[in-house]
Image (cartoon, rainbow, N blue to C red):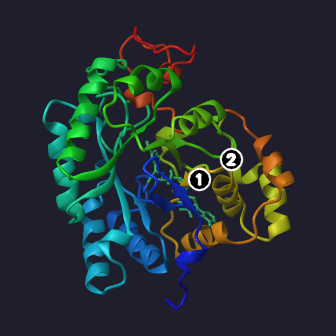
Amino acid sequence: MNNRIDQEVVPLRTLYSGEKIPCMGLGTFGSDKYGADMVSESVYGAIKYGYRLIDCAAVYQNEDRIGMVLQRLFAEKEVERKELFITSKVWNDMHGEGQVLKSCQKSLMDLRLDYLDLYFVHWPFPNYHAPGCSGDSRNPDSRPFSVEEFMGVWRQCEELVEKGLVRYIGMSNMTIPKLEAVLPLCRIQPAALEMELHPSFQQPELFDYARKHDILPIGYCPIGSPSRPERDRTAEDVSDTQLPAVVQAAKAHQVHPAVICLKWAVQRGQVPIPFSVKEAQYIANLKCAAEDPLTAEEMEAIRGEDKNCRLVKGQVFLWEGAEGWEDLWDPAGVIVTK
Ligand SMILES: NC(=O)c1ccc[n+]([C@@H]2O[C@H](COP(=O)([O-])OP(=O)(O)OC[C@H]3O[C@@H](n4cnc5c(N)ncnc54)[C@H](OP(=O)(O)O)[C@@H]3O)[C@@H](O)[C@H]2O)c1
């Protein structure tokens, strides 16, 4: 591939420590549609092109394959470990005492790395569902959020930093009430908050809250996850690439509407982590962050497209007695504990 982006032109974002990281990363969740080989080959091609941030997770079941391509890239001297920013996440079935260390060690072994740059608590509950499960599957052991249980997980994450296994720790799928409850108890603050963010789901309050607390918002499903699993689809869902302001900007800039979603995300200040196994797509995605920005009017028009349309509702994590998926997200502004 003679097509490589110059690192100098990729905008950067700043973590609370002052360290800079790229304004965009590559997602690696194959959505039960793309297998580990395809996803890891896209990681290989994307890093060769110039991606430096890769968003991994144990539950995506492809870290071992990604580890193989990372080794290949190091052996070929394409990139050095210290140039990359690799994230992973502890899955919900590994929250118990001593389990977080085991989970992190497994991810390190699979990814063939000595350390992770950022390690997330994937979901703030120990509620487990098997990869690839159907949308109506429920685990009878599921329970609501508990500050005490969550802090048990967070303390284990803090120990990973102290042991030098991870450089930063982060939270994912949180709400303001949950953050309000746990942030004062953290010895090491979260560096990032991974949250669903796309034009039809902008979460302005949570986004502002994170930034105010020096927590970098990392936006998942930045294109509205058009290939998401069936369990995450409902009739009410909006397609981000069909929103009028997105389509209009795509025409004006002569790019795919997906690319407009990413330009908007980068210019707003979140770090989108789009997924793609298609070379032309992942190249276009990173490239768009470095050229031809949206105008202030286009940014404002896209801001007006927010429909509060959450795609990853998380219903498979519901506990007995919960009224609906909304309970996972503290709809009344207080932690749902019933
Ligand atoms: N923390 C969490 O709980 C959580 C939850 C969900 C996701 N994530 C992370 O976020 C990442 C991204 O989310 P996602 O994969 O669900 O959704 P996404 O990035 O919004 O959508 C990915 C899909 O968009 C299409 N696409 C990508 N680039 C395109 C382009 N330039 N032109 C046209 N279409 C394009 C592709 O569809 P086709 O395949 O049809 O071409 C691709 O499969 C995941 O991979 C994962 O790393 C984290």
In this orientation, which residue lies closer to the viewer: 16 or 114?
Answer: 16
Q: Residue at x 52, y 25 (%)?
A: 176
In this orientation, which residue lies closer to the viewer: 138 or 39?
Answer: 39
Q: Residue at x 41, y 62 (%)?
A: 54
* Mark 1 lies within 8 Å of ligand 1 (Cβ measured): yes
Neighbourhood count class around disc 2 (C-alpha, 10 Å): few under 14, some 14–19, many 20 upward:
some
Q: Residue at x 40, y 53 (%)?
A: 32
Please tell me whether mark 2 sits on a helix, a strand or a loop. loop
Give the answer, above or below, for where 328 lies relative to 131: above
- Give me the disc on residue 332: none
In this orientation, which residue lies closer to the viewer: 305 or 37?
Answer: 305
Give x and y (percent) for residue 137: 37, 30
Q: Amino acid at mark 1?
A: Pro
Give x and y (percent) for residue 8: 56, 76
* Mark 2 lies within 8 Å of ligand 1 (Cβ measured): no
Residue, far bottom: 2
Question: For residue 287, which quarter of the picture?
Answer: bottom right
Residues under numbered marks 1 and 2 in contact, where contact means CB atoms less than 8 Å apart = yes
Q: Which residue is mark 2?
A: 239
Q: Is residue 23 visible?
A: no
As drawn, is 227 to the left or to the right of 138?
Answer: right
Give the answer, above or below, for where 323 lies relative to 38: above
Estimate the spatial distance between the alpha carbons at disc 1 and disc 2, rounded to whole Å: 8 Å
Question: For residue 191, which quarter of the picture?
Answer: top left
As drawn, is 286 to the left or to the right of 126?
Answer: right
Neighbourhood count class around disc 1 (C-alpha, 10 Å): few under 14, some 14–19, many 20 upward:
some
- Give me the disc on residue 226: 1
Q: Is residue 197 visible?
A: yes
As drawn, is 182 to the left or to the right of 141?
Answer: right
Of pointers 1 and 2, the one earlier in the residue sequence: 1
Q: Amino acid at mark 2?
A: Ser
Give x and y (percent) for residue 311: 57, 39
